[in-house]
Amino acid sequence: MLLGCIADDFTGATDLANNLVRAGMRVVQTIGVPDEDMRIDADAVVVALKSRTIEPEEATRQSLAALRWLQAQGAGQIYLKVCSTFDSTERGNIGPVAEALADALGADFVPVCPAFPENQRTVFKGHLFVGDLLLSDSSMRHHPLTPMTDASLVRVMQRQCRGKVGLVDHEVVRQGAQTIAGRMRALQAQGLRFGIVDAIGNEDLLSMGRAFAGLPLLVAGSGVAIGLPQNHGLMPSEAAARLPVIPGPKAVVSGSCSAASNAQVVDFLQRGGEAFAVDPLRLAAGEDVVRAALAWAAPRLGEQAVLVYATAQPEAVKAVQGRLGVEQAGAMIEEALSAIARGLVERGVRQLVVAGGETSGACVQALGIARMRIGVQIDPGVPWCHAASPVAGGEGLNLALKSGNFGTPDFFSKAFGTLAQ
Ligand code: ADP
């Protein structure tokens, strides 16, 4: 294993895996830290944790457990994957986890770069921009769990860790890998332990990738991934994305209420797709909606995908949340949709698209999936995967897990065509 990655959330892990595959690595994503004896054949493994907003001590404990497993597999370099908007609280968890990993690896200097210019996340003079706005002026300042009110990553990182944080600014980055490496050595000689690295375009990520060759640890969003496979002589290739394609009925389960998912449901219906709407109020009233959905789906399963969805417009979601409570409504619907996903696979579905980050987590759990091989990209950030599942048995199944706002309006129909190619 050339690269061992630790991601602080599930869809972020898939986003990273997708970029590594595009740049030529064969990648497996695991759900949590694998059992000690699990052996994986891949150039890179991404361990998906759910550690972004938990207590820093617990996030550190889980990340160190992931590190030990990756080291036991022979990982040559460790990549701590964080959000491209550097989502974190005042106490962490990026700083404490990065510092604990650096201590464990004996890493004297660690570069930090969340930039992903293709997705409008750039870092200039250590300040993070979302599109044309400073992070602190973007909608991220209102995030319910990790409000980001300071765009200076040097300051944000410094508040979270003991080691000193400096800057490798764009003036240096644009001169290429050797200059970047030289600046990192100079910062280290001055007693600094972390360096925020500027990037405003893909060429910066590629230079950075070369400069980071041989470092034990780096902290980054998914963008820097495009510059690492070149260090191992790997080039973009179709072979890296090759997956087993499992023939069988197709289905989509959508629990995301984001604007993109709403548009995708409308598009699917307009094309004449068959769909079953899950009504949260009937669920709350104790009706067996799971059974009803599966009874509806069973005679329709086949070549044409069926859709089961709870996706609704913001006003409808607010009304449901007002009646049932935000968390209760979310958990109840996730449970129902994941039971439906499981039932669909029991009834033969082998190509399954799930929309929604939390919904995907619940479905993967209900299907007993421990790891997924990452294949071809459908839309940025969303690849097809292949996984073994005790529910599917046999050759396993193909899955695509779409976080809320990803994908074009025709995603639910075009996804299956991408897999067939
Ligand atoms: P996204 O990736 O778009 O954020 P998630 O699956 O992470 O999607 O989150 C959507 C949440 O909304 C889930 O907890 C889901 O159960 C809940 N939900 C889905 N449909 C409805 C609805 N009609 N009313 C209220 N909540 C809903």
Image (spheres, rainbow, N blue to C red):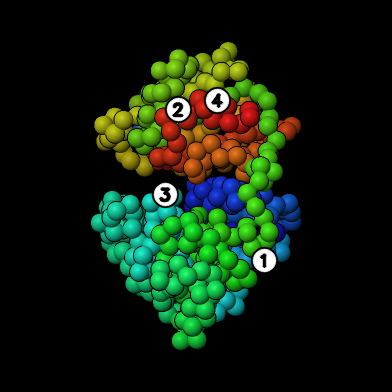
Q: Which mark is residue 418?
A: none
Q: Please name the residue that numbered disc 2 is placed on.
A: 410
> Which part of the image, by quadrant, shows the C terminus?
top right
Asked whether the beta carbons under mark 4 and mark 2 sit within 8 Å of each other, the answer is no
Q: CA distance from mark 4 to mark 2?
A: 15 Å
Q: Is residue 387 visible?
A: no
Mark 3 residue type = Asn
Q: Position of residue 43 (x, y in %)?
A: 68, 55
- The alpha-carbon separation of the residues under discs 4 and 3 comes to 29 Å
SS for dot 4: strand
Residue 322 to residue 96: above or below: above
Q: At x 40% / y 33%, what residue is drawn?
A: 261
Give the left or right position of residue 325, taking residue 43 as reference: left
Residue drawn at point x = 47 percent, y = 81 percent: 187
In this view, the residue in front, 286 or 229, is 229
- Say which of marks 4 and 2 sits in front: 2
Tell which of 59 and 168 is nearer to you: 168
Which numbered circle lies on residue 76? 1
Q: Amino acid at mark 1?
A: Gly
- Distance from label 1 to label 3 (Cα)? 28 Å
Q: Which residue is mark 4?
A: 251
Real-space Cα separation, disc 3 to disc 2, in angstroms: 20 Å
Question: What separation in Å lies between label 1 and label 2 (alpha carbons)?
Answer: 40 Å
Contact check, label 1 and label 2, Cβ < 8 Å: no
